[in-house]
Image: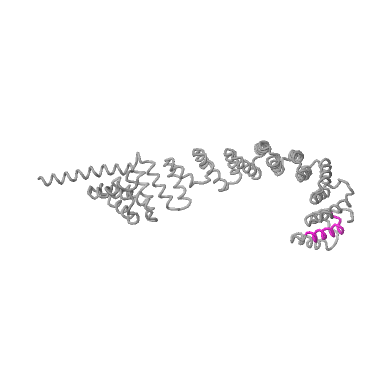
């Protein structure tokens, strides 16, 4: 290969240059690397542009023509280090051929001359291939100190953790980098891999939270939720979900399990407003009612009934129909209407202790205590029959029934 005088990259040297470029790029894109190398070589000989030379040699490397790369670089450089790009290609070719001693010598000389991060990195690659991990690490540290490149740091961490078994040092390097430069996806994921392998739950949680700040990904949020749940740290989980809005459905479940019905009602309303899913409106009504069960104002009662009435027009899910019916009964708003709702529920759920209890309570409110008792005698032997509210109803209905019998006896005596 000749070494013609260089010209400007944007200067067109011969008429068919653009066509030659297209043919070379097409060969490269179709992975015909040797043909691409030859075409770029032709371009270099005709146009004397260094980028064609570099592209030619890179394609020879891809074609595994390593000996050819070495020969061409030697012909051009004559052992000089003046063109680092060419020297780097020769080092790679030597490594591919397993000539590690020669590659090492050249890589050390190049790194010493340029003191560039890429050349320290290349030298480390030679040492890694030769399984000299301590020396490789030193070159990587030199490269890292030049520009704090996270890819270099990642290689350092792998060598420290996997090859040198210096696990604490690997973590320390990574964590120090995140404190100074932030936790990128690459570094966060490397820490996650290490902490997962070490079964370090606190470390995992910390990194997943940092990663979530970078990427509001549902899969990451799910991991954070799982870890908090594993730790049973529901207070911090609620704080996380309130701050990030990462999963409002889980947050709703946590509010309900913690009996924080006021927040549950408000959140269910938000979910309804966002999704138009009528079940969320039903849940909002139920939690609003439970939040004020000890002190129920007429305003709250009206709000709950209006919501549940709207829900009952769009769905016949037993939970909402029963709640509406029971509220109408228990608060003496419209007992007969409440009983109609309960009977509708019982058509599809005839053996539910809770729905039967609601019906019995409706008859009690209508002073039909015999009917109510007959139902409750059945309920107490069913699953759910020992519920405190059910037992309260049983007590009141039995008392009412006894009074009814006494009243009938009194009439007979007269």
Q: Is residue 73 left or right of residue 198?
A: right
**Residue 344: which quarter of the image?**
bottom left
Image quarter (top left, top right, bottom left or bottom right) of the C terminus: top left
Image point 16% across, 44% down: which residue? 407
Give the percent coordinates (x, y) of residue 236: 51, 38
What span is in magenta? Answer: 33-49
Given residues 98 and 175, the one toward you in this image is: 98
Q: How is the image coloured?
A: one colour
**Residue 34: which quarter of the image?**
bottom right
Q: How many marks?
A: 0
Image point 56% across, 48% down: which residue? 219
Instruction: Name, please, the residue furthest toward the left.
Output: 414
Q: Is residue 308 left or right of residue 254?
A: left
Q: Is residue 36 left or right of residue 410?
A: right
Which is the main secondary structure of the residues drawn in magenta? helix
Q: Please say whether residue 275 is one of the residues in the magenta stretch.
A: no
Give the percent coordinates (x, y) of residue 39: 82, 60
Q: Is residue 24 above or below residue 394?
A: below
Q: Is residue 184 left or right of residue 328?
A: right
Give the percent coordinates (x, y) of residue 43: 84, 59
Give the percent coordinates (x, y) of residue 199: 59, 40
Given residues 308 and 378, the one toward you in this image is: 378
Q: Please say whether residue 43 is one of the residues in the magenta stretch.
A: yes
Image quarter (top left, top right, bottom left or bottom right) of the N terminus: bottom right
């Amino acid at each position: 290969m000749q070494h013609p005088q260089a010209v400007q990259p944007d200067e067109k040297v011969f008429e068919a240059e653009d066509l030659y470029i297209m043919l070379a790029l097409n060969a490269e894109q179709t992975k015909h690397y040797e043909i691409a190398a030859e075409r770029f070589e032709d371009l270099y000989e005709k146009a004397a542009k260094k980028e064609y030379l570099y592209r030619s040699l890179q394609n020879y490397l891809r074609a595994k023509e390593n000996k050819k790369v070495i020969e061409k670089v030697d012909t051009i450089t004559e052992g000089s280090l003046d063109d680092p790009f060419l020297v780097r290609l020769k080092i790679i070719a030597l490594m591919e051929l397993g000539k590690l001693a020669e590659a090492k010598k050249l890589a050390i000389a190049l790194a010493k001359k340029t003191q560039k991060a890429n050349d320290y990195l290349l030298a480390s690659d030679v040492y890694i291939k030769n399984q000299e991990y301590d020396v490789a690490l030193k070159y990587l540290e030199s490269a890292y100190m030049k520009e704090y490149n996270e890819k270099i740091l990642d290689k350092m961490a792998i060598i420290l953790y996997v090859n040198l078994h210096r696990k604490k040092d690997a973590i320390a390097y990574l964590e120090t980098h995140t404190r100074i430069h932030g936790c990128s996806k690459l570094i966060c994921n490397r820490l996650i891999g290490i902490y997962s392998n070490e079964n370090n739950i606190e470390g995992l949680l910390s990194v997943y939270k940092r990663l979530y700040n970078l990427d509001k990904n549902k899969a990451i949020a799910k991991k954070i939720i799982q870890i908090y749940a594993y730790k049973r740290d529901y207070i911090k989980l609620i704080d996380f979900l309130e701050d990030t809005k990462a999963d409002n459905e889980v947050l709703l479940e946590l509010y309900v399990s913690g009996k924080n019905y006021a927040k549950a009602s408000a959140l269910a309303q938000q979910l309804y407003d966002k999704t138009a899913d009528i079940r969320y409106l039903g849940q909002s009504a139920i939690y609003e009612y439970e939040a004020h069960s000890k002190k129920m104002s007429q305003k709250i009662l009206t709000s709950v009934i209006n919501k549940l009435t709207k829900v009952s027009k769009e769905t016949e899910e037993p939970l909402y129909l029963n709640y509406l019916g029971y509220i109408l009964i228990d608060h003496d708003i419209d007992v007969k209407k409440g009983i109609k709702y309960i009977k509708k529920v019982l058509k599809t759920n005839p053996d539910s202790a809770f729905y039967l209890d609601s019906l019995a309570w409706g008859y009690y409110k209508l002073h039909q205590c015999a009917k109510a008792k007959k139902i409750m005698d059945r309920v107490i032997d069913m699953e759910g029959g020992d519920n405190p509210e059910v037992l309260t109803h049983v007590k009141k209905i039995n008392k009412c029934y006894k009074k009814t019998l006494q009243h009938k006896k009194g009439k007979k005596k007269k």
